[in-house]
Amino acid sequence: LESKALRKSLGLEELGISGGIRVIGVRGSKLLNYSSGSDEGDFICSGAVKKRKINDEDETKSEKSAQNSHADTSSNAAGEIIWEENKLRANDVLLSINNIEIGMDGSIQLSPNRPDERINFRSIVTSQRVGSKVILDVLRDRQRKQLEVTLRITQYLVPQYDDFDACPLYAVCGGCVFSPLSLPLISEKTGKRKNTSSTFNRFYQDQREGNDQVLILSKVLADEVNVGYHGWSNLLLKSVNGFEPKNIQELVDVIVRKLEGEMVEFRCQMVGLEEADFVLCMKMQEVLQSEQRILHRHMIASWCSRDALPSGVQEVVGNSTSTGAEMSVCWKSLKNLRAVLKNE
């Protein structure tokens, strides 16, 4: 808030307040931006602050009452913790955290003994443990308020780091490789951790609800069974024979339990071209017959990753096999797995 005109408009000058940063908007229902009065805000993302144009967002489900006409959740500037309780609002001015005053440039005093050295206010939040409570001093509609909020881990719809929130998961059906979208996967495909021109960059900062994932057709392993679809990749999976899986486990469950007809039909979309309907249609019998041929040709040990199997499927397989070796042989083959589940 280095703009004198904006500070006067917000009532900071008449109250004699020299610091503070303005909450300029909310992305979805989770992420918070802050501003120094420019046309661009500092968009909060994991581990860094990057410039991004600010867009108005629709009200979320939590904003049903008049009192909560703006989304009230927020995130910390490092992107690893979100202030969970719905109290901060767009156009609030954040003045201090835990009685540590924030300057108009978003900086705080390093320590009382070193008044001339300043660091970014994010350090106040990142030094706290998850579950800790912090006190926010806020100017809202020219009235000062104190808000107590709880810190929690952020949960991105697109996982950010291997072995932290991202786990390599896949399922192969008729040579079509499906995976949950993650930044490590994007990095593997593009050679960059975050590619600003990536098809999927619109999902990077979205927050996950429940076990939702963005499922994509990562690639098609060329074979006779999928002629006509060679070269298809990076498409959003929307449905399988009418079922709309929300994550990789639901997709596997649909493939092994619910596909009963002669055909298997995957419907996909391209980001930015949602009106286009990409359809991959194959005969189920040919899909099962081609499984081992495709896996062997591409040196893939199993039709899906072990963690992609729903717990219910794993339980049935465990009860149907007597040894670990039999269990391993069963779940590594889509054909064998469907046969076991059919006889449950």
Image (cartoon, grey):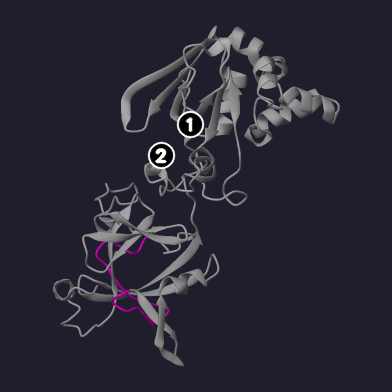
Q: Residue shown at 27%/67% (left/top)?
A: 92
Q: Is residue 326 visible?
A: yes
Element under disc 2: loop
Residue 93 spot, x, y in % from top left: 27, 71
Task: Label the magenta part by its dominant secondary structure.
Answer: loop
Query: Which segment is the magenta one?
Result: 82-105
- Amino acid tagged 1: Ile
**Image position of 215 with respect to 326: above or below:** below
Q: Nearer the viewer, residue 58 or 203?
A: 203
**Image position of 334 with respect to 314: above or below:** above
Q: Is residue 157 magenta?
A: no
For the image, the number of numbered tags is: 2
Is residue 339 left or right of 195 when viewed as pictured? Answer: right
Residue 99 spot, x, y in % from top left: 40, 82
Residue 139 spot, x, y in % from top left: 26, 74
- Local packing at callout 1 (Cα closer than 10 Å; few below 14, some 14-19, many 20+) is many
Residue named by callout 1: 216
Q: Residue shown at 52%/71% (left/top)?
A: 128
Residue named by callout 2: 200
**Image position of 111 with respect to 316: above or below:** below
Labels 2 and 1 touching (C-beta < 8 A): yes
Q: Is residue 92 magenta?
A: yes
